[in-house]
Amino acid sequence: MRSAMSFFSDNAAPACPAVMDALVEANRLDTAYDGDQWSQAMDRAFSDLFGTDVAALWVATGTAANCLALQALCPPDGAILCHRYAHIEMDEAGAPGFYTHGAKLTLLDGDGAKISPDAIEEAVARVRKDVHQVQPRAVSITNATEYGLTYSPAETAAIGEACERLGLAFHIDGARFANAVVSTGADPADLTWRAGAKALSFGFIKNGGMNAEALILFDPAMADQVRRARKRAGHLSSKGRFAAAQILAMLENDVWKDNARAANRAATTLAEACGDRLFLPVEANELFVRMSAEEAASLRDQGFDFYDWGPGEIRLVTSWDQDMEAVRRLADAIAAL
Amino acid sequence: MRSAMSFFSDNAAPACPAVMDALVEANRLDTAYDGDQWSQAMDRAFSDLFGTDVAALWVATGTAANCLALQALCPPDGAILCHRYAHIEMDEAGAPGFYTHGAKLTLLDGDGAKISPDAIEEAVARVRKDVHQVQPRAVSITNATEYGLTYSPAETAAIGEACERLGLAFHIDGARFANAVVSTGADPADLTWRAGAKALSFGFIKNGGMNAEALILFDPAMADQVRRARKRAGHLSSKGRFAAAQILAMLENDVWKDNARAANRAATTLAEACGDRLFLPVEANELFVRMSAEEAASLRDQGFDFYDWGPGEIRLVTSWDQDMEAVRRLADAIAAL
Amino acid sequence: MRSAMSFFSDNAAPACPAVMDALVEANRLDTAYDGDQWSQAMDRAFSDLFGTDVAALWVATGTAANCLALQALCPPDGAILCHRYAHIEMDEAGAPGFYTHGAKLTLLDGDGAKISPDAIEEAVARVRKDVHQVQPRAVSITNATEYGLTYSPAETAAIGEACERLGLAFHIDGARFANAVVSTGADPADLTWRAGAKALSFGFIKNGGMNAEALILFDPAMADQVRRARKRAGHLSSKGRFAAAQILAMLENDVWKDNARAANRAATTLAEACGDRLFLPVEANELFVRMSAEEAASLRDQGFDFYDWGPGEIRLVTSWDQDMEAVRRLADAIAAL
Amino acid sequence: MRSAMSFFSDNAAPACPAVMDALVEANRLDTAYDGDQWSQAMDRAFSDLFGTDVAALWVATGTAANCLALQALCPPDGAILCHRYAHIEMDEAGAPGFYTHGAKLTLLDGDGAKISPDAIEEAVARVRKDVHQVQPRAVSITNATEYGLTYSPAETAAIGEACERLGLAFHIDGARFANAVVSTGADPADLTWRAGAKALSFGFIKNGGMNAEALILFDPAMADQVRRARKRAGHLSSKGRFAAAQILAMLENDVWKDNARAANRAATTLAEACGDRLFLPVEANELFVRMSAEEAASLRDQGFDFYDWGPGEIRLVTSWDQDMEAVRRLADAIAAL
């Protein structure tokens, strides 16, 4: 059991009150699968949020959202360009290979797990246009990235333009999309479809949800195939209303933004204390901090919990419900090292 | 929105109070994925229930449970023998083909969606033992079946013996396993591993759960591969404690049995009213009833809701929370037709 | 080693002289893969034969031809309707499941391994149009069938019309297409694209080829994906000229028709001797003959070789090079039983 | 059509006389698939060659040999470590992903497309041993490499030891195995099973074969699954005797070694002329040569044909039948540049 002193992972945080209330509210007899009133309201709710017609599907995990998107955007014989440290490459147990029936991930470099239009261009240029080589068909970026950086609307649009020019479909892994939105202050539309994105894995779980993520398809014509693939992957929950209800509850009253702001604020507070120990800017809710083994041990002795990132490095993650008193104590402890 | 007058599907029912309470209780900071105290308690809890060491994994749907089991029991080039009306054949959108990477379902006949050892033997005998034909490698039965019948311990053991003799792995789809257990009065062990079963999809959702099923592996050595496949299929929930907690809550105090008994009891009450309209025995919580279109319309006029099964046939399904007053009203209405 | 007395399988026959000569002729330095002059001539040669623009690819086996076609015509989540005794179901080791990434074969009945438009309609009608059930997407017939019957142009067109009406892609397994063409006397176009077929596996090996079959795509726009899939399946031979050359040699001077006529003629001669022992008409180069175990043993004692089809049944297959003297001796021996 | 002046690719070369004679010899009636006398002799012939019991299967292409081996050595959820420039990564259109059902290729660096035990160790060390990351399960090296270098018995054994220590299966892509054997002078056993290799793709086509490669399994217990997978991939030729016969013909009288020696000798002759233009040692039949665009154009004006490798680089490949007069002319022309 982890305590308020934990800065280990936003996956470890509880579900937020709005979600718990919504589950109680949805706990009535209704149509099975996604025929219920909540599931049926998803398309509308997200279309309103994004200012364009979208199809919105709940799924149980971010991996499912990512890979259902990728299987729709890349054929089995194609390649998906992504960062070397992308979650789909590093932490999804090969799920992209499973869902796409064997498509390849082509790995790009870039600081802070961000990729650039140039990196995409170069990767495409390296591939001969023949049947012997796997042809690039899609790009996947993560916003905020696995290293806590964000893509601005302009950066996202530049990637979208490269995709358009090179005939690549554009997917965004938004496990921490909320953190990116409130950090950049951008319109969600400018971080997605207006920049050319075809699909977004819109994360709710790390941000206060229980067990539902949203997959947003900016081309609703894709929905029929993806709904079928969702069922085929065992992700069509028979009481889908519990998934839809928690997502809708977080959209209502901008709970998703409030939660993300709280997490980002805690991170900013810590960032100030860390100063030049930071080896990456803090733009969302993750901090990557230089720290000797002795220093880390000292913090742990004081009750703080976090992840060892590498030799001389730790990672701190703040959550939607991070106790600000604990945050201040950690900030002080780091400053005092 | 469906009402208390609905006999449409047990998937439409709410989650039971024990489950809702458990979710609130589990809503604390804990380790992500399946490192939390609840998830870690699963193996022990089911080992106690079955009286043997098992590995127990939560997943989000029955389809995921079934297909994770099947991919472990049947190689891509093999065949799984199942009934022509098995859920894995009829209602899982080809998920077995996806999870097994292309294995084949060989369809057997049998009354009430039950298969017999003879049917298995005959199907195996029809296959030449060469590389040209897909070799049978597994059997999957459903208990209770898609037509509401149960397999007794003796019937299950007979299938297990056929599997053993023929070199086939034995899986049980127990989406309504609880209903079968209380209906037969059998020890769960006698309906599973003592009869030779290697894996059981143990259903909780239809029986009062929210969104978690259990996959029970009677050979714990299989667990490592299956846990990996679960992650690869996007079924490793990052806040897994919410899945584990609801399952454990239903095991505690035999909630799972009480719920199933309530559903079965409602079905029995209706069965008496249906008399020889029934074209199959009622052994769990489903009734298959001969009824003219006019009669069905008359019941619907009275507010009852149910599924049209075929020409002149309807299906009634009772749930753990079926209102007994509504049950009696429907019984009376049928008797009065 | 089998002798001239063998009526076991047309796969056992040698390659014909035109093929052997063509291999010698092609045994020169040329471009690798399918860049050589022979491979480049395939599209034109088959377009001339069929009287429409087609793409024509060589592959090493009929299974590869069938399954490359099926993966292009049916998505992973779809079903292919075929006869219960179709080669793709019975004798390809699950290759369709491999190439299509898990699509399902839905099995139809029909005499002599032929399927009818009605059987297709009924199979489609049984499927609910929802995400839970695997949707039919393609039909595959075999002409001549696995039981040696042929589809006429009218029968083929009727199937094509059903496919068109029901939104199904239409594939023909023509492992013995040559035998069907000469037996029906039909224009190859009327047995394929004019009847609505999208792809034909055009068999050469059983008919005197060595190790090359042709996959004909009646919609050349499919070729890019199929060429890629061929490479991905390890079927892009690096010295492809040897595949192309043998196919072109059999097209030239109608060798393919002469060979098929010879095989059919031998079958007809035997059919006359078999009389009402035949339990299926003889329309190509296969005979299915009622024969007691004693009678079969007697024939074998006289040196004849053939396949036991079932209790009291044998199968005789005639080849392009069947020795007519041996045929007459077998005919006499059967008549004398 | 390419001429004797071509140094473009050993895939462009003809089949050698021993192969052509063997095809004529095998052109008789025999059992279909791999039941014939030639196919049945494969295991014995290669067991004799390697001095241990092996299973030996013919297949149509090197890609098929490689990927049938890999699917047997690596599960769908695993990773295969190989060089960044390995044929399986660069030039097989994603076939490893297809055959393994989605396994991942993890790319290693190393000069001349060779990988070292250290590179393997480091790659394994980077992977967390949990269900989130794809676990390394196999290593594949190419000998001779895609850059014409060879692994010595000692180097191969060192890789085998690393594999053993790390629990990885060891595969060798031997598209140019013959060139490596004669170049190193090593016993084939020392380059394979004595060094711990489990499977070898033994190339014949580039070395004078027509369309058959051998897949050698040093653990014959693997053969049952691989034979099944071969059929499932459409690679069980129905007249398999033509594949077996050409392979056996090249084993007989060491034709395979003579052919490889001829190709290597031509390469050595050219290497001397290239001097320090070579940016990699010449250890087999490929030369990588620094050459300006003008110089390359000059050679082409003289009738020579070859592949542009990169800016200022060309590749020369010599074949088993390379005309030594043309070789000397090219050597002179290069020396004269």
Image (cartoon, coloured by chain):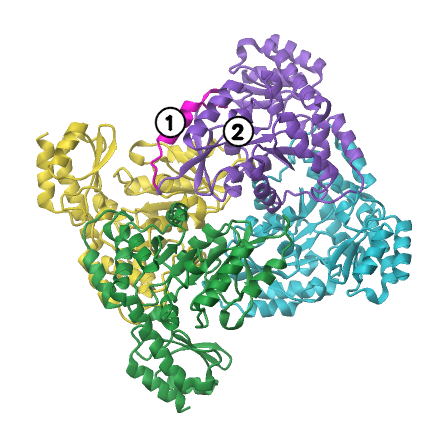
Chain colours: A purple, B cyan, C green, D yellow
User: Would you say D133 lies left or right of D106 here?
Assistant: right
Q: Which residue is mark 2?
A: A197
Spot occupied by residue B242 in the image (x, y as percentages of width and height): 72, 35
User: Would you say C156 lies left or right of C318 here?
Assistant: right
- Residue D67 visible in rendering: yes
Question: With respect to residue B28, does D90 lie above or below?
Answer: below
> Quick check: is D326 in the magenta stretch?
no
Question: With respect to residue B147, does A257 lie above or below?
Answer: above
Q: Which amino acid does the dot numbered 2 rest on?
A: Ala
Where does the magenta region start and end?
A: A110-130
Q: Considering depth in this image, is C273 or A335 the residue closer to the camera?
A: C273
Spot occupied by residue C97 in the image (x, y as percentages of width and height): 50, 54
Spot occupied by residue D217 in the image (x, y as percentages of width and height): 38, 54
Do the residues marked 2 and 1 share a common chain? yes
Q: Which residue is mark 1?
A: A122
Q: Residue at x 76, y 63 (%)?
A: B312
